[in-house]
Image: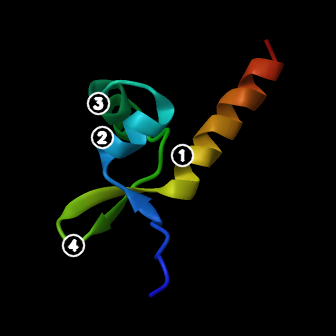
Amino acid sequence: MPTLERVVLRPHEAAEQLAISRSKIYELIAAGDIETIMVGKVRRVPIDAVGRYVERQRHQGEGS
C-alpha cells in the first residue's frame, strides 16, 4: 500500500519543524504569521504554510 504524505501538521508539530516552542507557534498563529485551517473542530497548519513562513522570514532578512 502506498504511503500517504501528510498535508497538515498539528501546531506542536509545526513548532518542531521550525525548532521553536509551542508557545511561540501559537503567538505566530494568533498574529496571522502562519496560516492555519480548521479540520472539524481542530486547528491544523498546512505543511506549505510552514515553508511560506520561512521564505517570508528569509526575504525580510534580505532587507536588513
Could you tell me residue 18's position as x and y percent? 49, 33
Real-space Cα separation, disc 3 to disc 1, in angstroms: 14 Å
Real-space Cα separation, disc 4 to disc 1, in angstroms: 21 Å
Question: Circle 3: is it few (<14), some (14-19), or many (20+) Cα within 10 Å?
Answer: some
The answer to whether the residues at label 2 and label 4 have Cβ atoms under 8 Å apart is: no
Residue at (44, 41) in percent of width and height:
32
Residue at (17, 66) in percent of width and height:
41
Q: Nearer the viewer, residue 31 or 16?
A: 16
Q: Amino acid at mark 2?
A: His
Q: Amino acid at mark 1?
A: Val
Question: Circle 1: is it few (<14), some (14-19), or many (20+) Cα within 10 Å?
Answer: many
Q: Farthest residue toward the left?
A: 41
List the residue tagged with mark 2.
12
Closer to the N terminus: mark 2 or mark 1?
2
On residue 22, which mark appears?
3
Real-space Cα separation, disc 2 to disc 4, in angstroms: 18 Å
Q: Farthest residue toward the front?
A: 1
Would you say 9 lies left or right of 53 here?
left
Real-space Cα separation, disc 3 to disc 2, in angstroms: 6 Å
Closer to the N terminus: mark 3 or mark 2?
2
List the residue tagged with mark 4.
40
List the residue tagged with mark 1.
50
Would you say 17 lies left or right of 15 here?
right
The answer to whether the residues at label 4 and label 1 have Cβ atoms under 8 Å apart is: no
- Indicate the quadrant where residue 15 lies: top left
Closer to the N terminus: mark 4 or mark 1?
4
For the residue labelled by badge 1, is the local secondary structure a helix, a strand or a loop? helix
- Number of marks present in the image shown: 4
Q: Amino acid at mark 4?
A: Gly
Real-space Cα separation, disc 4 to disc 3, in angstroms: 21 Å
For the residue labelled by badge 4, is the local secondary structure a helix, a strand or a loop? loop
